[in-house]
Amino acid sequence: MSTSFDAMPPDPPAGTSILDHLGVTVADVARSRAFYERALAPLGIAVVMEVTAAETGGPAFAGFGRAGKPAFWIGDGGPPGGRVHVAFVAADRAAVDAFHAAALAAGGRDNGPPGLRPHYHPGYYAAFVLDPDGHNIEAVCHRPA
């Protein structure tokens, strides 16, 4: 096992993700959906599935993903119990820049402008925003310029 970020591969091999999907609680699913629709569009991520409150008998959910597969879910549940950090893969550095601009235009708060983060590894290019509930949302590209 590597203990150095320098030893990380620049791009993980296809199919190596250990997660199928992730869900976060939001205070207002409609507000957060509007934020994420705009913020994630530059990354090619959109709502691909919805589950209504009538269908669940409880909270409503929106699932974001690519190619019809929801991987990131938001759901009503009252004020979030804690903050989370979620990093989305960007195809290139321009997509990271576009994500940051779109997220700020959608009402997000800057939590780190686009740029290199060489303390992770030399090619780690990322941007961070806080969503409407204060979750730390990141877009990251591991490819060299």
Image (spheres, rainbow, N blue to C red):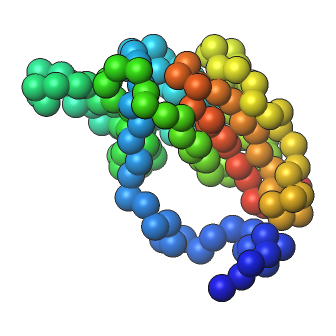
Left or right: residue 52 compared with residue 82: left
Q: Residue at x 83, y 64 (%)?
A: 121
Q: Position of residue 76 (x, y in %)?
A: 32, 23
In the image, 114 versus 144, the foreground residue is 114
Asked if 6 appears above or below 73 in the picture, the reply is: below
Between residue 6 and residue 97, name the one nearer to us. Answer: 6
The answer to whether 81 appears left or right of 96 in the picture is: left
User: Residue 123's quadrant in the figure?
Assistant: bottom right
On screen, residue 109 above or below 126: above
The residue at 45%/14% (across/down) is 31
Image quadrant for the C terminus? bottom right
Q: Which residue: 89% across, 63% down?
A: 122
Q: Which of the 4 image quadrants contains residue 79?
A: top left
Q: Is there any visible trace of residue 4 in the rendered image?
A: yes
Quarter-wise, where is residue 60 in the image?
Answer: top left
Left or right: residue 47 compared with residue 38: left
